[in-house]
Image: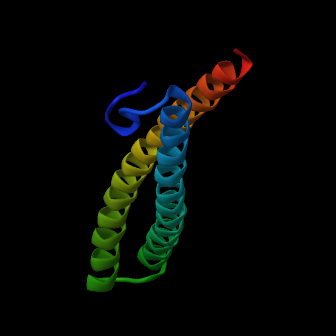
Amino acid sequence: MMGARGEGGAPQAAYAAEVAACEHTLAGLRSRSARMSTVRVVTFLAGAAALLVVDVAEGPTAVLSGVAAAVLAAAFAGEVAAHRRVRSRIRWEEAFRALGVEGGLRLGRR
């Protein structure tokens, strides 16, 4: 745990630095996750709208809407995969932060 971010100094300071670094990283990741959620909703709604146009339209409009729906479905799947990676990283950083907090508390009990 005391890798690149928590080098040198007293152990208590190293744990505090680790916790602060994790909190900074978590803030950025949570913000990114919220933006990704918004993009996913917009992509889903656009894909649903394209499918509705396919249902009502005829001819080339229906074909173009079908292609758009397929592209949006693929984009949505990619967004879901990327969002899962970000959420996994959030859980990882939360675990690091919890270990840093616990380490600092254990040192305080001595």
* Residue 50, quarter of the rendered image: bottom left
Q: Is residue 41 above or below residue 61?
A: above
Residue 16 image-quadrant placement:
top right
Q: Is residue 84 left or right of residue 4?
A: right
The image shows a total of numbered marks equal to 0
Q: Residue at x 57, y 26 (%)?
A: 99
Q: Is residue 80 above or below residue 55?
A: above
Placement of the C terminus among the 4 image quadrants: top right
Identity of the residue drawn at 54% across and 57% down: 27
Q: Position of residue 96 (x, y in %)?
A: 51, 31
Residue 57 locus on image (x, y percent): 42, 83
Which residue: 49% across, 67% down? 35
Depth check, front residue: 22 or 12: 12
Between 53 and 40, the one nearer to me in the picture: 40
Residue nearer the viewer, 69 or 30: 30
Q: Residue 105: image x %, image y %? A: 69, 25
* Above or below for 103 versus 36: above
Quadrant placement of the N terminus: top left
